[in-house]
Image (spheres, rainbow, N blue to C red):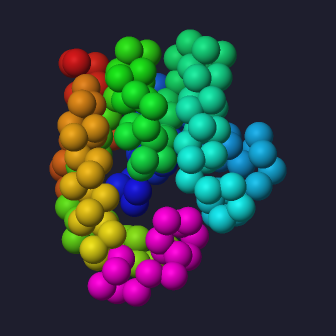
Amino acid sequence: MGSGKSYWGNLLSQKLNLPFFDLDEKIIEKTKISINQLFLEEGEEYFRGLEKETLLALTSDNVSFVMACGGGTPCFYNNMDFMNSKGITVWIHCTTEKLYKRLEKEKEKRPLLSGLNEEALRGYIIKKYGDRKMYYEKAAVVIKEEDISLEKLTDQIFHV
């Protein structure tokens, strides 16, 4: 969350002339409900089920594409193993401090962050990073956010 997946995914899809999918946006299209609302009304477990269902549908309906998934997507229902079996996964490795600076500005738009004060947000980011890192490390390509460029990203993807 906040590492730049949607930004870089969109640029990469344009460079490769491939469709770009934002998994959260596809869920919103499907349900006609915001992610925030889904979390509040139905809970995280329901959302994660929809997320998996949407991920499976997109990968079965499309041969080549670029996708930005949610920060939690790789951590549930063996999604990371599934994504690795279907394509090239990328982890944009971002420091927790950089994530904090970005997410602090937009926390009300993010269902898991809305309402957190500064200390709670920092704690949340550090905990989630620790919990999720083992899934992210399974990515075929790991690129540091401070080193990323479209050229470096493309080069690493094509040299997996």
Residue 74 placement (x, y as % from top left): 39, 37
Residue 64 placement (x, y as % from top left): 53, 17
Q: Which image quarter holds the N terminus?
A: bottom left
Q: Is residue 151 visible?
A: no
Q: Which image quarter holds the C terminus?
A: top left
| Residue at 71 percent of width and 61 percent of height | 41
Foreground of the two, 82 or 142: 82
Left or right, 149 with respect to 17, comes to left
| Residue 81 against residue 67 in the figure, above or below | above
| Residue at 52 percent of width and 75 percent of height | 114
| Residue at 64 percent of width and 23 percent of height | 57
The magenta segment is 107-121
Foreground of the two, 51 or 154: 51
Quadrant in the rendering for residue 54? top right
Q: Is residue 109 magenta?
A: yes
Q: Is residue 21 magenta?
A: no
Foreground of the two, 96 or 5: 96
| Residue 26 against residue 85 in the figure, above or below | below
Residue 52 placement (x, y as % from top left): 56, 32
